[in-house]
Each structure stands twice: as structure tokens, then as C-alpha cells.
Image (spheres, rainbow, N blue to C red):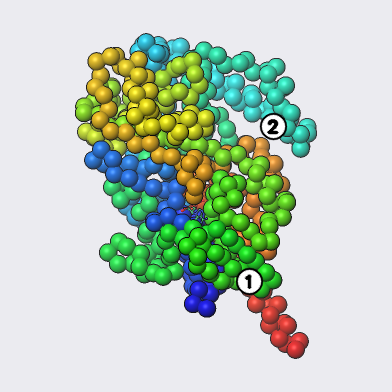
């Protein structure tokens, strides 16, 4: 069978590519990567907008400047990727109310400190709750006693920024603890995805920046994975069949929840339950292009916040002048329910809402946006969300079950990373880890075969 190989890798995001690289470097080079879309990169994805390159998915290399080196930061260095340090700390001094007044820095700093303290307290409660009672999730009553409910627009805005955007300030997240607290925005015409091309180039045939290697198969939507004692059979939606000894599956948790892929025999209950118990976060960056700048533009004004009575309603803004001077582009970040809401409406409606918010902040005379870009990660059948959002005190068994192979199917991707889920480096490191586990399994299987033959 021409479509027979050692390992099939489903998905050509960073985890799939890093998994394939490790396998080929270790002598397993008859791999086939089946990717549903017409490109590699997955949630790392650039697009041309308003004359520059913008990142619809991952935008930052998060966790730089610490004791250990972030491997993605190293890849960026090797590729000479252009990056710019982001300093979110000024955002708290650029909080607008809905009549356009900036909160005085004293009030803003005070509210910020209060929100951080209360978030830390909330975490401590969760921690002691987890220690007291490992498997019960009944912390709501404790929280409502100790944390005041946040109600004012400024409190809602800060709560959104702390929890949905810049979590490093309150939570002991491994990314920042291990790799450092700095974050660098990727601002490179070749895109964040250039890192993946560089990686792919080292083991796949390429020519003039294009991958020309039959081991990478684009536009192949995997619809079914069958496994037996001896191997796996993978079916794609265009009617092709691929056979292999093993599969590495890198589709996101959202995709696994959506049942795009059916399994024969069905996945065991411990696996399907773990998949269903994972929370998927939706995170949307909306880009708006203007005929000219009307917002304050100093480097300490890069991030600004809109305080409104509805949590997460066009709250967090960024101007792109530091990345691309003269581009006249603003970015606003929405999450979860707000993301789903705007995905369901037309881009014109979204532009109208955003303009109303901007006019509240900067006055009625500002010009209309001339272009808008709204990524739709939630409705993308090959994503179904942006990244996993494990609670900080995560049930370890859940994580182990998400990660554990089912016979010949190995799971990889951002969601299987114990320490760095939700990040590019989480995806990258998970690919390496999964491949190493599979190489070990292949070694053991070969050993069993040799023993069997010796016995005969
Ligand atoms: P993916 O990139 O999703 O790769 C999986 C691949 O599988 C995809 O290419 C998909 O098309 C393919 N696939 C799915 N189903 C099938 C199928 N049935 N058949 C064949 N192929 C299939 N991380 C950071 O570090 N910094 C950030 O600033 C950051 N910001 C983000 C902002 C957004 C909006 C999003 C969406 C993500 C962000 N992330 C960020 C997270 C980061 O992008 C991901 O953690 C990482 O890219 C995931 O890589 P992966 O290989 O696990 O998954």
C-alpha cells in the first residue's frame, strides 16, 4: 500500500511539526502529516491587513528573561524574527470611562492593586480548598464570603484584563515562573509561522519557501481513525485511506469535543470524559484600520482600557504603532461569550459597535475605520476555540487522561502540556514529549517482536 507508513501525524500546527521533526531525527522518517487546511501553522497564523502583517492567532512569545530559556524564544533568535517588548503595566494608567475621561492615576492604581489582591486571595482560597478537599469543586461559597463582588466599570475592566488577558500578575503560571515575565510581540512580515517553516525545512524537502514533500499532505481532513492490534487505518473526508503503525493526533480539545473525528473502537470513557471536562477559551483579536491616528501614541500608551458596565465589552485595546509605525491600526481583544457573540454577527455590525466605543473614548469627530478583520476561532471546525484554560489548581488526573495514549493513538498539542498549556511553547514541547514517548513504545514493540522471533 503506497499509503502505508510508520506514523501518521494529524495536524501541522507547531506540535505536529515538532513531533514529526523529532521522529525523523530519530530514524523514523516514513511519517505522513495530514493537515485539514491548506497551510501549516494551525493557531499560528498571519494575514496581510492594512498594509502590514498581523497575527490572528498567537502574537506573543510569552515567558522571556528568566533563569531558563524559552525554547520558542531560541527558535525566534535562530530565525531572526523581529519582536518587540510589550509593557502592559502602563495600561492601568490609560483607563477611559465611557464619557472619555481618563481615570486619575491614583484611582486607577488603587483599583488595580485591590483587584490583584482580591484575585490572589481568591486563589489562596482555591488552593486551601483543593488541599482540604481534593476532588470537590465547591469553592463558590467560600469565595463569595471573602471576595467582594466587583461591580463598578473600572473594577470589571481590571478584572477582565487580569483574568482574560494578562494572567501573569496574579497566578503563579509556570511560563512566567520558569522562563521569565517578559513578553515579546512578534512583528515580522514573515509572520510567527516562519518559525514553523524553518523547523519543517530541516526535515522536509522545500523549494523557494514552499514545502514540496509528499510527507506533508494538505487539505486532508481526518474523519475516522480505526485501530486494531496491528495498526491504524486513517480515513480522510476526500475518501483516502492511510495505514500506519501509530497515530499522533494533535487536533485541539475543541475539535476532539466536536466529534469531527470518529474512533473505531470508540475512545474509552476515561478519555472522552476528560476531553469533555476541559474548558476551551475563545480569544479574539479584532483589527481595525483607520485613515489616520486619533489616539495618543507614546510607547507608554500602547495599551488602553475601556471601563464599561458590561464585562469584557471592547475592554482591552492596543495600538500597533510600536510594532509598525504609521500603520494606523488598533487591535481590540474580546473573549469567550463576547467572542462567540461577535463571531455570529456581521463584521459591519462589529465595526459599528467598536466605533461607538471608540467615539465614547475619543469623541464624536474621530474618523470611521476603513477596514476590519475578525478572526473566527470558535466557528473554525479545525479549531473550535483558541486554547485550553485549565484551572490553576488543576485536577492532575484530568491532565494525565488528556495526555495518555489509547493503544496506538498518541495525543499531543498545547492541551497535553502539563506546565505550558495554552502557549506556543506548550505546543512545541508537547510535540517533542509525545514523539519521545512514541519512540520508546516503538523500541519496546521491536524488542517484543525480536523476542517472539527468537522464541519461534
Ligand atoms: P494547532 O496549532 O491547533 O494545530 C493543530 C492542527 O491540526 C491545525 O493545523 C488543524 O488545522 C489540524 N486539524 C484539526 N483537526 C484536524 C483533522 N480532523 N484532520 C486534519 N487536521 C486537523 N500562545 C502564545 O504562546 N502566545 C500568544 O500570544 C498566544 N495567543 C493566542 C491567540 C489566539 C487568538 C489563539 C487562537 C491562540 C494563542 N496562543 C498563544 C496559543 C497558541 O497559538 C497555541 O497554544 C498553539 O499554537 C497550539 O499549537 P498546537 O500544535 O497544539 O495546535
- Position in image of residue 17 (x %, y %): 46, 60
Callout 1–callout 2 Cβ contact below 8 Å: no
Residue placed under numbered mark 2 in the picture:
127
- Position in image of residue 358 (x %, y %): 34, 20
- Position in image of residue 441 (x %, y %): 64, 68
The residue that appears at 41% across and 70% down in the rendered structure is 214
Q: Nearer the viewer, residue 405 or 222?
A: 222
Residue 151, by quadrant, is top right
Q: Nearer the viewer, residue 265 or 309?
A: 265
Residue 205, by quadrant, is bottom left
Total label count? 2
Above or below, 213 against 87 in this view is below
The residue that appears at 28% across and 40% down in the rendered structure is 49
Q: Is residue 23 visible?
A: no
The residue that appears at 42% across and 48% down in the rendered structure is 44
Q: Nearer the viewer, mark 1 or mark 2?
A: 1
Determine the secondary structure under disc 2: helix
Residue placed under numbered mark 1 in the picture:
231
Residue 51 in the figure: left or right of residue 225: left
Above or below, 104 against 44 in this view is above
Determine the secondary structure under disc 1: loop
Q: Is residue 31 visible?
A: yes
Q: Nearer the viewer, residue 248 or 218?
A: 218
Mark 2 is surrounded, within 10 Å at the Cα level, by few (under 14), some (14 to 19) or many (20 or more) other residues, namely: some
Q: Earlier in the sequence, mark 1 or mark 2?
A: 2
Amino acid at each position: 500500500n503506497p499509503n502505508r507508513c510508520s506514523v501518521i501525524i494529524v495536524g501541522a500546527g507547531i506540535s505536529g511539526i515538532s513531533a514529526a521533526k523529532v521522529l525523523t531525527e530519530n530514524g523514523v522518517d516514513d511519517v505522513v502529516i495530514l493537515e485539514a487546511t491548506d497551510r501549516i501553522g494551525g493557531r499560528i497564523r498571519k494575514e496581510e491587513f492594512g498594509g502590514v502583517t498581523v497575527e490572528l492567532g498567537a502574537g506573543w512569545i510569552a515567558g522571556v528573561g528568566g533563569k531558563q530559556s524559552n525554547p520558542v524564544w531560541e527558535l525566534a533568535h535562530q530565525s531572526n524574527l523581529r519582536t518587540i517588548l510589550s509593557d502592559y503595566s502602563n495600561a492601568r494608567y490609560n483607563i477611559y470611562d465611557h464619557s472619555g475621561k481618563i481615570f486619575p492615576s491614583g484611582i486607577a492604581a488603587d483599583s488595580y492593586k485591590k483587584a490583584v489582591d482580591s484575585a490572589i486571595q481568591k486563589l489562596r482560597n482555591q488552593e486551601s480548598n483543593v488541599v482540604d478537599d481534593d476532588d470537590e469543586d465547591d469553592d463558590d461559597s467560600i469565595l463569595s464570603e471573602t471576595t467582594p463582588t466587583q461591580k463598578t466599570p473600572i473594577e470589571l475592566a481590571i478584572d477582565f484584563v487580569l483574568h482574560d488577558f494578562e494572567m501573569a500578575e496574579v497566578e503563579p503560571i509556570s511560563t512566567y515562573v520558569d522562563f521569565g515575565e517578559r513578553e515579546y510581540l512578534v512583528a515580522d512580515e514573515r509572520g510567527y509561522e516562519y518559525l514553523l517553516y524553518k523547523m519543517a525545512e530541516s526535515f522536509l524537502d522545500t523549494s523557494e519557501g514552499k514545502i514540496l514533500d509528499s510527507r506533508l499532505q494538505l487539505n486532508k481532513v481526518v474523519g475516522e481513525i480505526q485501530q486494531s492490534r496491528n495498526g491504524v487505518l486513517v480515513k480522510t473526508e476526500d475518501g483516502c485511506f492511510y495505514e500506519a503503525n501509530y497515530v499522533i493526533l494533535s487536533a485541539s480539545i475543541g475539535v476532539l469535543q466536536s466529534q469531527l473525528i470518529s474512533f473505531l473502537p470508540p475512545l474509552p470513557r476515561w478519555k472522552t470524559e476528560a476531553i469533555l471536562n476541559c474548558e476551551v477559551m475563545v480569544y479574539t483579536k479584532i483589527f481595525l484600520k483607520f485613515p489616520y491616528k486619533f489616539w495618543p501614541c507614546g510607547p507608554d500608551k500602547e495599551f488602553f482600557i475601556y471601563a464599561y458596565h458590561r464585562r469584557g465589552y471592547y475592554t482591552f485595546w492596543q495600538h500597533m504603532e510600536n510594532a509598525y509605525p504609521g500603520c494606523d491600526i488598533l487591535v481590540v481583544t474580546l473573549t469567550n461569550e463576547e467572542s462567540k457573540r461577535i463571531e455570529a454577527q456581521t463584521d459591519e455590525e462589529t465595526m459599528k459597535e467598536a466605533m461607538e466605543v471608540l467615539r465614547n473614548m475619543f469623541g464624536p469627530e474621530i474618523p470611521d475605520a476603513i477596514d476590519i478583520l475578525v478572526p473566527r476561532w470558535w466557528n473554525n471546525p479545525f479549531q473550535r476555540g483558541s486554547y485550553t484554560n485549565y484551572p490553576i489548581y488543576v485536577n492532575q488526573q484530568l491532565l494525565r487522561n488528556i495526555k495518555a495514549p489509547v493503544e496506538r493513538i498518541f495525543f499531543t498539542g498545547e492541551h497535553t502540556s502539563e506546565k505550558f498549556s495554552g502557549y506556543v511553547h506548550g505546543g512545541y514541547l508537547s510535540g517533542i514529549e509525545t514523539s519521545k514517548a512514541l519512540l520508546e513504545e516503538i523500541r519496546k514493540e521491536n524488542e517484543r517482536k525480536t523476542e517472539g522471533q527468537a522464541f519461534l
